[in-house]
Amino acid sequence: MYFIGLDVHKKTISYCVKDAAGGVYQEGKIGSTRWELDAWIRTMPQPRRIAMEATIFTGWIYDHLLPHAEKVKVAHPLMLRAIAAAKKKNDRIDAGKIADCLRCDFLPECHMASTEIRDRRRTLRYRSLVIKQMVQMKNRVSGLLMETGVSYNKQRLHKVGYFAELMTANGDVHESIRPLLKLSREMISRSQKLDYALVSSLERDPLLKERLRRLRTVPGVGPITALTWALEIGDFTRFSSIKQAISYCGLCGDEKSSADRVMRMPISKQRNKHIQRVLIEAAKLGPRESPELAVIRARELERGNPNRATLAVARKMVSYMLAVERRNQDFVPAEEFSRTAAA
């Protein structure tokens, strides 16, 4: 078996090929294009295993090389940096260390979702960018009005009818900001249409449709929460326990223990930030739809920390969604489940 380590960059890829004993068979540098990869892989010895560090370019390289190797692995960047830390660092050395980690089975492998899931996840994350820009434009509209001393109804400002009335009937709107307000309104309208189109296309997707329907039976889970869970989690079977799923979603803190002393730290930064943000927002609305979630929130609020109450609700929602996925059936509230079991 030959072990190939790749240090991937935007324009070049450094590689190092080692045999099972750790001897360097070949090393060098190639361009990061498909045809150069095809020409290079034909010159590599077989059988072979390939490893690379996770970067923005990793996805297409992983898909391209997968049919040409016994196994292709992707390493977690932070953990790999801790294992392979050294005083001297360059692309050649990095490729060699990745090959050594792969050869010795020390590679901190991270999960690679299927190509289908990654393609749809890209669409959902693009939608997040659209929403962020739309919110910025709405804030800019409010800022322009406040700068020039125009009174407005904050709750109705971004309604089409009220905005048109504000532009025509309010004489306080200065001529200098009217073109900017109209341009901002047009951008907001385009963003709303684009948002609707992106979400609708994902909801109608045959790969996701039934899965999304089941997830939406969980209280507090709407279309965006269901989409984010399905596309960010991907294959739910990779989590052997609820604790692992909660940790991946960033809903628990770090722990630092020494001797008999245990310290709980703030929420860890090593998490999937996309699903964490969505679950936190969903947990604020979930208690309104579920008595069980309301009880959990009330119990945590008695301790006096509303943020911990929100996290507790979010963790419970993760357990609900994971149970729905594992059982492959709709969510059943506890009281109905008890009645069914008793009958």
Image (cartoon, grey):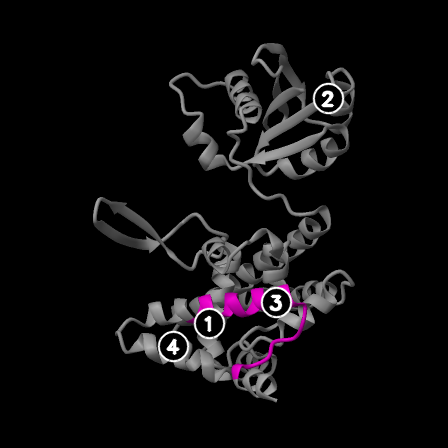
Quarter placement of the C terminus: bottom right
Nearest the eye: 23 or 306: 23
Discs 2, 3 touching: Cβ within 8 Å: no
| Residue 44 as seen in the image, left or right of residue 92 | right
The residue under label 2 is 47
The residue under label 3 is 226
Q: Earlier in the sequence, mark 4 or mark 2?
A: 2
| Amino acid at circle 2 | Pro
Is residue 13 visible in the rendered image? The answer is: no
Q: CA distance from mark 4 to mark 3?
A: 21 Å
| Amino acid at circle 4 | Arg
Give me the disc on residue 144. Answer: none
Residue at the front extreme, as displayed: 342
Q: Is disc 3 surrounded by few (<14), some (14 to 19) or many (20+) residues within 10 Å? A: many
Nearest the eye: 24 or 286: 24
| Residue 181 as seen in the image, left or right of residue 43 | left
Q: Is residue 282 magenta?
A: no
Residue at position x 51%, y 65% in the image: 318
Q: CA distance from mark 4 to mark 2?
A: 55 Å
The residue under label 4 is 297
Please state which of the two labelled residues, at mark 4 or mark 2, is closer to the viewer: 2
Q: Earlier in the sequence, mark 1 or mark 4?
A: 1
**Measured along the vertical axis of the image, is residue 321 above or below residue 48?**
below
Quarter placement of the N terminus: top right
Could you tell me residue 73's position as x and y percent?
62, 34
Residue at position x 57%, y 56% in the image: 129
